[in-house]
Amino acid sequence: MNPLQKIGAFTAALGAAFGAAYGIGVGIGPLDADPEPAAHSESHAPPARVEAPAGLQVSERGLTLDLRTTALPAGRPGTLEFVVRDAHGDALTAYDRAHGKQLHLIVASRDLTTYRHLHPVRAADGTWSTPVTLPAAGAYRVFADFVPAGAEKGLTLGADLTVTGRYAATELPPPSPTATVDGYTVTLDGSLAPGRESDLTFTVRDAHGDPVTRLQPYLGAYGHLVALRSGDLAYLHVHPHDAAEGDATSGPAVSFAATTPSAGTYRLFLDFKVGGEVRTAAFTVTAGTGAGAGHTAPPPAETGHEGTHGHP
């Protein structure tokens, strides 16, 4: 057989081998093929909507916090004015009471060392206003916590406020299970766990170390607690375990249930009433590390319990 004949015979044999292999492959299919993902044959449902923590948005559920006062001078009396507007831009004038008030206004510095819990008054046109004095310059957040009339649940809207003056940076106080205000020492028992409800119990003692057994009702309970996340100031909804009735007194302990959206550092502000005066104890707590409240005593925070708890 000459060379050309040999090449032709080799080419024919090679083609036959490839043809046979192709036929076998078609018959049994690819050896390493994965089955088609089930999602391709099912409807593409959108992922479940995760509700954002409260206070991070200026508008939600068709309502908007219109903060008319966007700046105040440090250390001088001023007035905060705002309106809650509906989807048409009209002022909201119908509210349901929650914790004894139609609306709770929280003002906190971004460094969480200054805190005010205020109860503004509402004019007939829907404008809310309240006097306030903020001691230090810097960035602040204003939270309007309320329940629109007929709504199934409450709503917290937030807006930024600037306090003008000479600014000095302040570090967040380190975690500690105790806080002292006006001679009263408050001890925190409990820790925050991300993503689930946690029990927090605060025990109040007087300057002699004796338990305070005459805590007075305040906003429908024997204490009111606000929790803010360091960094973005996410606002946590906290609920007391026991409601206060009439003019009864209780103590020395008051308990709450708090749900923490994430790991991180939080600032807790406890309002309690003794002898007709409301005071605020502040705590730094870390969630998600197992460290609980920590054991380092912080410097006192400027919580401003004088003239900051109005009762219109």
Image: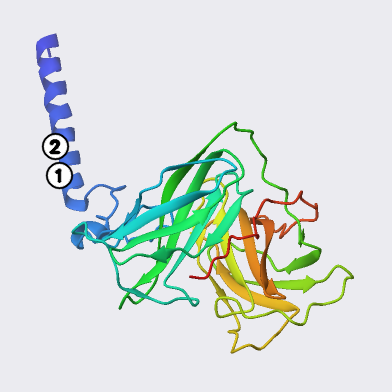
Q: What SS does tag 1 mark?
A: helix
Asked if 7 appears above or below 67 in the picture, the reply is above
Q: Which image quadrant is residue 207 in?
A: bottom right
Q: Horizontally, is 75 left or right of 281 in the view? A: left
Residue at (57% x, 65% y) in the render:
309
Q: Looking at the image, which is closer to me, 206 or 237? A: 206
Q: Do labels 2 and 1 touch, CB within 8 Å?
A: yes
Kindly identify the amino acid type of the residue bearing the numbered disc 1.
Answer: Gly
Which residue is at 60% across, 49% downward?
112
Q: As displayed, is residue 282 above or below residue 240? A: above
Residue for badge 1: 23
> In which image quadrant can residue 279 be found?
bottom right
Asked whether residue 71 is in view, the answer is yes
Q: Residue 284's x, y, as percent?
A: 68, 55
Q: Which residue in the rendered view is the most extreme toward the right?
A: 208
Q: Secondary structure at mark 2?
A: helix
Q: Residue at x 88, y 71 (%)?
A: 209
Q: Nearer the viewer, residue 100 or 4?
A: 100
Quarter of the N terminus within the rendering: top left
Give how far across and how far down residue 72 sits, in percent: 48, 42
Residue at 62%, 55% in the rendered image: 267
Left or right of 58, for residue 45: left
Disc 2 target residue: 19
Residue 11 position in % (x across, y down): 13, 22
Name the disc covering residue 279, or none.
none
Scheme of colours in the image:
rainbow
Question: Is residue 116 shown above or below 101?
Answer: above
Is residue 54 in view?
no
Q: Amino acid at mark 2?
A: Gly
Residue 77, position as x, y percentages in the image: 54, 48
